[in-house]
Amino acid sequence: MAELEVRGTGKLHFLFKERNWPDPLLYKFEETLTADELREKLDIPADHVEVVYINRLIKPLSTSLQEGDRVTFIPPGVPTIHRFNLGFYDVKE
């Protein structure tokens, strides 16, 4: 069974705390799944996620996840200067 780390930032950090999830949340999986499928399995609404980082790189939500990946979901509403510094000011999927 494979395992990866999941984190949420901004508003999603509070959602994780509300659900009493540890930081990071260790998620075990047997079948290949994408970041978007992981979001669905964690019951995180699609409109709560604007960007996903996988191993500190911005990736499409359609990216397949691997054993040991570190996944961070970023919600919409990050201020402009931070969007630019984080590298997703003009990200198109």
Image (cartoon, helix red, strand yellow):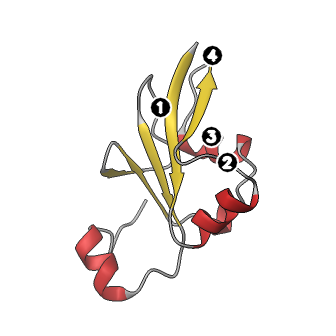
- The amino acid type found where label 1 is placed reads Leu
Q: Is residue 56 left or right of residue 25?
A: left
User: What residue would you read off at disc 1?
Assistant: 65
User: What residue would you read off at disc 2?
Assistant: 21
Identified at 45% across, 80% down, the residue is 78
Residue sitting nearer the eye, 90 or 85: 85
Q: How far apart are marks 4 and 3 (CA)?
A: 12 Å
Residue contact between numbered discs 2 and 1, judged by CB atoms under 8 Å: no
Element type where label 1 sits in the image: loop
Identified at 67% across, 60% down, the residue is 17
Identified at 43% across, 50% down, the residue is 60
- The amino acid type found where label 2 is placed reads Trp
Element type where label 2 sits in the image: loop
Q: Distance between the residues labelled 1 and 4?
A: 11 Å
Ranked by sequence position, the earlier of labels 3 and 1 is 3
Name the image quarter holding residue 35: top right
Q: In this view, does 7 lie to the left or right of 39?
A: left
Q: Where 9 sits versus 44, above or below?
A: below
Residue 38 numbered mark, or none: 3
User: What residue would you read off at disc 4?
Assistant: 30
